[in-house]
Image: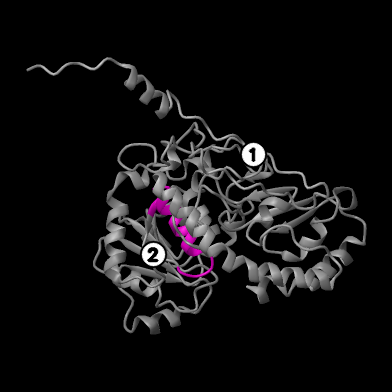
Amino acid sequence: MIAMFVRVIPGQHRALLELLEEGRFDAVLSESAFTGVAPYVALARAERLPVLGLATTPVTLTSVDAAPFGAALPPGRGPLGHLRDRALTAAIRPGLTRPLRRAVDAVLAEIGAAPSRTDTFDFPYLCFDELFQLSVPALEYPRRELPDTVRFVGPLRAAPGSAHDTALPDWWSDLQDGRPVVHVTQGTIDNADPGRLIAPTLRALADEDVLVVATTGGRPVEELEREFGGPIPANARVAEFVSHDLLLPLCDAVVTNGGFGGVQRMLAHGLPLVVAGSTEDKPEVAARVAWAGCGRDLRTGKPRPSAIRRAMRDVLTTPSYRAQPGARHRDRRAPGCGGRHRRGAGRRGRGASGSPGGAGGAHRITGVAGVPVRTLSSAAPPRVTRCGSASGSRTRRPRAGRARGPSPSASRRRRAARPRRRARG
């Protein structure tokens, strides 16, 4: 991570300043992993342009309400669950962030910039003037620390009509033969080895009454054929690339390795997912899909065909997985970049223990009116300093939602005041 995100800071920062010297810009839009913007955004607001961020991963902000990013665990339930999350944060976060922060501060010193005021994982959420999160609140763990500068805007969309310029494969009409259509993809990054997910999926579904559409992410189809070690199953169709704008409306489910952008678009089309990812942020994406009730997390990047088959049968036959998992994508109150994040928006009601609301484990994407999460009063969040704030001002943070009804202590006092009935002999 140091080589990818830290050592590039000086070069990226120089390139940014050289571009800004042209003096014809009104703002800076930076992808959240473009760390070269860090020295610039740390300047006083009067000395720089507005800096907007674009987050292309799940939320990485440290929180008392969730396990640390990288653990790939949903928020704990009850006092023990909250204790687990805080213990994991205390145990994992320092060992992960301290080396990064030392490396960042050393690089910043080289270019004459002040030391960083935040951890690497918190930087996008505490330093940008506005941050566009390419997801929806219902697919993200509740965090009381999330500032009002974060806007959930849903997935990026292709320009209207651009997908129709793509040539369709000659088997395209097969998608209309009445069988459920299952798409399998390893995305565009972790796709060098089709034996991790695509080939096992073809084997898993070879005898199922479905049509499988596999895309290799631009890699030659011959690589998949060699990996498969024999003829491709009769119920499978393979291509290097097919536009998701054209394919996803015809699908019934997807097997994916959990690429963040792809998952957002799949859920926007209302598709249940089977997710198997183990690299980059994919385990965190998979955990959120399962937490939201939108699919199954196989918790591995190389699943067995039998596990894929069981999971696919489950998502195709269980109505709750298909109960409008993309409703929050399609029915955002403010499409595009218009909707500021509302704390608690899109969340189902949760008990004081943090247990999921709703009966039968129904997923959280169908909620129309969100309810703020109620968290343990003892879990006071740490004070967080906003980046670039010379005065050390603090981010505004909402009060933890109060549980309706009397407090447990009040209930105990009332019970103690009641006269005891004598036992009948």
Magenta residue check for 242 = no
Would residue 44 be found to the left or right of residue 284 on screen? right
From the top left corner, tell me how far across and down residue 131 is, in percent. Answer: 68, 49
**Which residue does the numbered mark 1 point to in the structure image?**
397
Would residue 97 be found to the left or right of residue 395 on screen? left
Q: Image quadrant of residue 277?
A: bottom left
Residue situated in front as seen by the camera: 276 or 385: 385
From the top left corner, tell me how far across and down residue 245 is, in percent. Answer: 53, 55
State which mark lies toward you, 2 or 1: 1
Q: Is residue 75 visible?
A: no
Q: Amino acid at mark 2?
A: Arg
**Which residue does the numbered mark 2 point to in the structure image?**
299
Colouring mode (rainbow / by chain / secondary structure / one colour): one colour
User: Which quarter of the rendered picture does the N terminus lie within?
Assistant: bottom right
User: Which quarter of the rendered picture does the C terminus lie within?
Assistant: top left
Provide the residue span drawn in magenta. Answer: 278-295
- Point out the tag, 2 or 1, that comes first from the N-terminus: 2
From the top left corner, tell me how far across and down residue 55 is, in percent. Answer: 64, 55
- CA neighbours of label 1 inside 10 A, class few (<14), some (14 to 19), many (20+): some
Residue situated in front as seen by the camera: 281 or 109: 109
Magenta residue check for 290 = yes
The kind of secondary structure element at disc 1 is loop
Residue situated in front as seen by the camera: 135 or 233: 135
| Alpha carbons under labels 2 and 1: distance apart | 34 Å
Contact (Cβ within 8 Å) of mark 2 with mark 1: no
Residue at 66%, 69% (x, y): give it: 100
Q: Is residue 378 visible?
A: yes
Q: Amino acid at mark 1?
A: Arg
The kind of secondary structure element at disc 2 is loop
Residue at 49%, 31% (x, y): give it: 369
Residue at 31%, 72% (x, y): give it: 304
